[in-house]
């Protein structure tokens, strides 16, 4: 199953970093947060990625093109026709498709633009700026069991993100943007989507978290997967420092791989 990562926004709320590189390329422990997210999915057996790039998208492409340079010791031998020798190559079982989905395209538009790479199959999707210790295998099983068009992960934090109204059966009844008096639960991303979702996206100007999710919620086709463990987005420099400190402490909750 393919995993779609939204990595095209400008990240204006963390402009101290995103002025120089895309927010998903901001490093935690010396590796882009995008890499951390991909390692999460890979741990659960999801290895086929589609990255919806946009802002400074060439930097994402260049980083993957030079992956061995970033992760291995290397010898440049100028005496032998400028040969390059990689030592202890560190590779991943990944297939990575990077798509330039536009500079100003909204989240829904970015998803719509990669439809041809998905085909008529369900897929997973999340944002390129947050990590979690969610059990992705259980999320997938939850989605398959309830047979709805979309499942999204919800967490319970005192933050103001997209706000959800969830009934006792874990069905999402409404989805709306944050308001000044909102509290938990919130949308944490980590979604599973059926291919019919593309029919709910009009074009580049569509914000996925507004019209499409609101509409399928009203139709009873949006399910909530509650997660009570760790989740942290990286919207600000303070949040980046929190993630960096967790990583350097050796107890980063999202790190399940060796």
Image: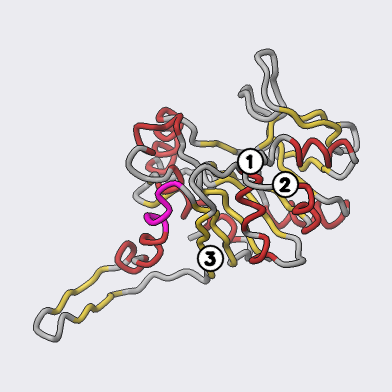
Which of disc 3 and disc 2 is earlier in sequence?
3
* Corner quadrant of residue 84: bottom left
Q: Secondary structure at mark 2?
A: loop
> Eyeballing the image, is 122 above or below 238?
below
Q: Crowding near pointer 3: few (<14 within 10 Å), some, many (20+)? A: some
Q: Which residue is mark 3?
A: 97
| Residue 206 visible | yes
**Residue 156 position in % (x across, y down):** 69, 29
As drawn, which residue projects farthest toward the left? 79
Residue 50 located left or right of residue 12: right
Dot label at residue 46: none
Q: Is residue 78 magenta?
A: no
Residue 23 located left or right of residue 71: right
Pointers 1 and 2 in contact (CB under 8 A)?
yes
Pointers 2 and 3 in contact (CB under 8 A)?
no
Label 2 and label 3: CA atoms lie apart by 23 Å
* Corner quadrant of residue 73: bottom left
Give the residues drawn in magenta, as a range.
Answer: 55-60
Q: Secondary structure at mark 3?
A: strand
Q: Which residue is mark 1?
A: 205
**Residue 230 position in % (x across, y down):** 60, 38
């Amino acid at each position: 199953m393919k995993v779609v990562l939204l990595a095209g926004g400008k990240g204006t709320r963390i402009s101290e970093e995103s002025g120089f590189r895309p927010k998903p390329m901001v490093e935690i422990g010396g590796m882009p947060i995008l890499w951390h997210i991909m390692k999460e999915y890979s741990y659960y057996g999801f290895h086929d990625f589609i990255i919806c790039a946009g802002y400074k998208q060439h930097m994402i492409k260049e980083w993957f093109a030079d992956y061995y340079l970033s992760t291995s010791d290397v010898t440049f031998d100028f005496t032998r026709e400028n040969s390059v020798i990689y030592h202890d190559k560190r590779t991943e079982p990944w297939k990575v498709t990077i798509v330039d989905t536009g500079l100003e395209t909204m989240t829904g538009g970015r998803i719509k633009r990669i439809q041809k790479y998905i085909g008529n199959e369900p897929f997973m999707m999340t944002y390129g700026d947050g990590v979690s210790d969610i059990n992705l295998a259980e999320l997938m099983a939850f989605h398959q069991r309830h047979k709805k068009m979309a499942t999204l992960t919800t967490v319970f934090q005192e933050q103001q993100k997209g706000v959800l109204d969830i009934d006792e059966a874990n069905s999402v009844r409404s989805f709306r943007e944050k308001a000044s008096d909102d509290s938990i639960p919130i949308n944490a991303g980590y979604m599973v989507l059926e291919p019919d979702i593309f029919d709910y996206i009009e074009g580049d100007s569509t914000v996925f978290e507004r019209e499409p999710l609101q509409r399928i919620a009203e139709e009873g086709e949006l399910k909530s997967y509650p997660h009570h463990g760790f989740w942290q987005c990286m919207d600000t420099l303070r949040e980046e420092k929190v993630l960096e400190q967790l990583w350097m402490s050796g107890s980063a909750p999202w790190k399940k791989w060796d």
